[in-house]
Image (spheres, rainbow, N blue to C red):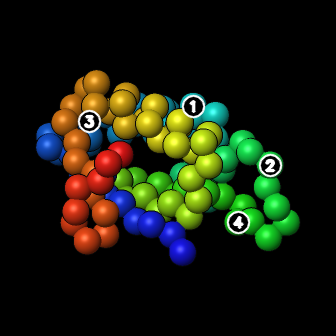
Amino acid sequence: MSAEFILSFEDKHWYATHLEEVTQTITGLDTFTGSFEPNELRLTGTEPRGPDDWSFDVRLFLEKERIFLEISAHPKSIERDLSILFEWIRSHTRILITDEDGELSDW
């Protein structure tokens, strides 16, 4: 079962005007494995995988005003890259990361 999170931006204008930079930052992560639908980017951990494991660990949906994250597994490489992504965004603007119930996340 996956966990779902919403990354929302305090300054919606920042996200809209920097979407290309956000996308480039995501695609530059070590765990980035591709884009499969418009605005859906996938990350896959670099750790060894079993034959029954999913082909990805995280899907990021770049929506109009927010990023929706679906995390099915979080090996160390995924945790590292998500931390890098969130820190990079936080260095530019204020964000909130909430779970599917609207509770603030530790991310």
Within-10-Å neighbours for mark 2: few <14, some 14–19, many 20+? few
Name the kind of residue labelled 1 in the image: Gly
Name the kind of residue labelled 3 in the image: Thr
Residue 54 image label: 4
Residue 65 seen in this snapshot: no
Give the alpha-carbon distance from disc 1 to disc 2, as whole Å.
21 Å
Give the alpha-carbon distance from disc 2 to disc 4, as whole Å.
12 Å
Label 2 or label 3, whichever lies nearer to me, is: 2
Helix, strand, or loop for circle 2?
A: loop
Give the alpha-carbon distance from disc 3 to disc 4, as whole Å.
33 Å
Q: Position of residue 58 (x, y in %)?
A: 55, 56
Residue underneath mark 1: 28
Q: Position of residue 84 (x, y in %)?
A: 46, 31
Q: Is residue 52 above or below residue 77?
A: below
Residue 95, quarter of picture: top left
Residue underneath mark 3: 17
Name the kind of residue labelled 4 in the image: Trp
Pointers 2 and 3 in contact (C-beta within 8 Å)? no
| Left or right of residue 83, residue 107 in this image | left
Label 1 or label 3, whichever lies nearer to me, is: 1
> At 19% across and 36% down in the image, what residue appears?
94
Q: Position of residue 32 (x, y in %)?
A: 62, 42
Pointers 3 and 4 in contact (C-beta within 8 Å)? no
| Left or right of residue 34, residue 62 in this image | left
Name the kind of residue labelled 2 in the image: Pro
Q: Residue furthest top?
A: 91
Pointers 1 and 2 in contact (C-beta within 8 Å)? no
> At 28% across and 31% down in the image, what residue appears?
90
Give the alpha-carbon distance from disc 1 to disc 4, as whole Å.
21 Å
Label 1 or label 4, whichever lies nearer to me, is: 4
Give the alpha-carbon distance from disc 2 to disc 3, as whole Å.
37 Å
